[in-house]
C-alpha cells in the first residue's frame, strides 16, 4: 500500500510540474599555432597514443567549460533580445522568468542563477569536444538558448580573447603612421631645397646639404617600407592566431520533453514506498525493543510456565485434608 500510494502521489505531483525541453550544441575549440610545424597533426598524433594531457587541448576545453558557465556570458544571454518567432511576450529571458522583480539587477541575478541550474557543460578531453545542453519551457526557447550561448562564446573568442599578434599589429600600425609623417616631412624639406636652390652643384655646402636631405628621405622610406611589410605580416598572424570554434552539432529544436519523466518517477516512488512498507512491517518489534533499551527499562520476556508448577502434588493434598 505505501508503494502504490507514493506512486500515485508521484504521478499527481508531476502533473503540476512544468515540462522542460533539452537542446544541445557541440563545438571543438581549435587554436592554430604559429610557425611551420603542423600543430594540428601533432596534437592528433599525440591524442591517438594517449598523451593528450601533454598538449594544451585539455586546458582549452576546461577554459571554455568555465567560460560557458561564467556570469558574464550568462548575463548577456538572459538580457539578449529574443525574436518574435519564439512566441513569447517578454523582450528578454530575464523579463520572461521574473517580470515582477524589484530591480533590474535583482532580475538579472535570479535569471542567471536559474539558467545556471538548467545548464550542463560536458568536456570530452579525448575527442576535444565541448557540449552545452540547456533546459527550457518550450522547444523553440531551448533551441534559441543553446544557440545564444554558443554565439556568446564565439563572440568572446573573436573580440575579447586577444593575442600577441594583435598587440604587435596595433603597435606596428602606430609606428607606421609615425614613419609616414616623418617621410612626408623629409620629402617636403628636400622639395623646398630644390625650389630654393635650382643650381647648387657649384657650391660644396649646398651639395652636402642636398645629400643629407636625400639620405634622410631614403632612410625614412626604407623604415616606412619595412614597417608596412611588418603590418601585413602581423595582420596575417592575427588571423592565424585567432581561436576558432568548430561547430560539431548545431542547436536543434527538441521534439520530446526531457523533464518530468512521469513513468520513471512513479516507478521510483513506488519502489521507495515498498521499501518503507517492508521496513515498517518487519522493523516495528526491533524498534520497540530499541526504544525500551534506550529508556533504561528491561525488555519484557514471556517465558512458558512449566507443567509441574501448574499441578498440585499429592503430598500437599494429603496435608491439606488432614
Image: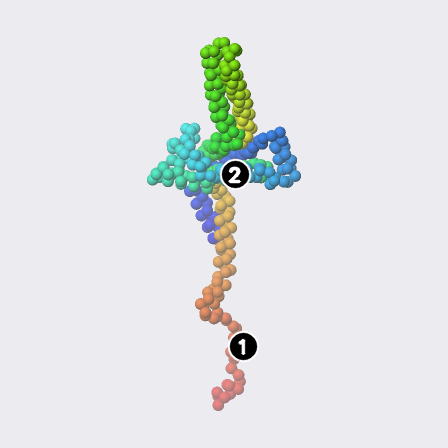
Compared across the picture, whether 94 is left or right of 28 comes to left
Q: Which residue is outermost to the bottom?
A: 322
Which of the two residues, 98 or 242, is positioned nearer the viewer here? 242
Compared across the picture, whether 247 is left or right of 294 comes to right
Q: Earlier in the sequence, mark 2 or mark 1?
A: 2
Whether residue 152 is situated above or below residue 9 in the rendered picture: above
Q: Secondary structure at mark 2?
A: helix
CA–CA distance in space, label 2 to label 1: 85 Å
Q: Which residue is outermost to the top?
A: 199
- Indicate the position of residue 236 as horizontal and vertical percent values: 55, 25
Which of the two residues, 216 or 205, is positioned nearer the viewer here? 205
- Indicate the position of residue 83 as horizontal and vertical percent values: 42, 29
Whether residue 322 is situated above or below residue 232 in the rendered picture: below
Residue ID at (41%, 34%): 79
Q: Give the crowd class for mark 2: few <14, some 14-19, many >=20 residues within 10 Å.
A: few
- Indicate the position of residue 287 as horizontal and vertical percent values: 48, 63
Q: Secondary structure at mark 1?
A: helix
Residue ID at (52%, 37%): 64
- Indicate the position of residue 265 as horizontal and vertical percent values: 49, 45
Whether residue 308 is situated above or below residue 126 in the rendered picture: below
Q: Which mark is residue 3?
A: none
Residue underneath mark 1: 307
Q: Nearer the viewer, mark 2 or mark 1?
A: 2
Residue ID at (45%, 33%): 141
Q: Is residue 2 visible?
A: yes
The count of marks equals 2
Q: Is residue 210 visible?
A: no
Q: Give the crowd class for mark 1: few <14, some 14-19, many >=20 residues within 10 Å.
A: few
Which of the two residues, 233 or 215, is positioned nearer the viewer here? 215
Residue ID at (41%, 31%): 81
Q: Which mark is residue 63?
A: 2
Amino acid at each position: 500500500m505505501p508503494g502504490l500510494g507514493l506512486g500515485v502521489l508521484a504521478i499527481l505531483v508531476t502533473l503540476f510540474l512544468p515540462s522542460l525541453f533539452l537542446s544541445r550544441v557541440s563545438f571543438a575549440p581549435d587554436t592554430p599555432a604559429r610557425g611551420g610545424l603542423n600543430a594540428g597533426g601533432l596534437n592528433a598524433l599525440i591524442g591517438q597514443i594517449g598523451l593528450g594531457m601533454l598538449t594544451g587541448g585539455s586546458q582549452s576545453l576546461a577554459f571554455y567549460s568555465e567560460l560557458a558557465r561564467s556570469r558574464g556570458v550568462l548575463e548577456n544571454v538572459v538580457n539578449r533580445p529574443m525574436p518574435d518567432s519564439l512566441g513569447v511576450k517578454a523582450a528578454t529571458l530575464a523579463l520572461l522568468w521574473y517580470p515582477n522583480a524589484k530591480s533590474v539587477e535583482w532580475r538579472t541575478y535570479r535569471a542567471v542563477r536559474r539558467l545556471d541550474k538548467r545548464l550542463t557543460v560536458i568536456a570530452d578531453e579525448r575527442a576535444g569536444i565541448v557540449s552545452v545542453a540547456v533546459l527550457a519551457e518550450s522547444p523553440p526557447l531551448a533551441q534559441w538558448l543553446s544557440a545564444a550561448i554558443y554565439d556568446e562564446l564565439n563572440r568572446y573568442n573573436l573580440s575579447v580573447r586577444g593575442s600577441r599578434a594583435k598587440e604587435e599589429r596595433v603597435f606596428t600600425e602606430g609606428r607606421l603612421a609615425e614613419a609616414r609623417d616623418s617621410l612626408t616631412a623629409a620629402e617636403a624639406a628636400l622639395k623646398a631645397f630644390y625650389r630654393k636652390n635650382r643650381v647648387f652643384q657649384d657650391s660644396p655646402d649646398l651639395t652636402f646639404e642636398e645629400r643629407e636631405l636625400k639620405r634622410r628621405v631614403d632612410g625614412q622610406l626604407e623604415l616606412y617600407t619595412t614597417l608596412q611589410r611588418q603590418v601585413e605580416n602581423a595582420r596575417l598572424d592575427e588571423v592565424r592566431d585567432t581561436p576558432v570554434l568548430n561547430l560539431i552539432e548545431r542547436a536543434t529544436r527538441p521534439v520530446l520533453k526531457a523533464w518530468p519523466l512521469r513513468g520513471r518517477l512513479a516507478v521510483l516512488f513506488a519502489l521507495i514506498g515498498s521499501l518503507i512498507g517492508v521496513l515498517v512491517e518487519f522493523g516495528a518489534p526491533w524498534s520497540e525493543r530499541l526504544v525500551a533499551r534506550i529508556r533504561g527499562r528491561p525488555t519484557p520476556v514471556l517465558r512458558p510456565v512449566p507443567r509441574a508448577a501448574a499441578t498440585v502434588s499429592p503430598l500437599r493434598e494429603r496435608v491439606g485434608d488432614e
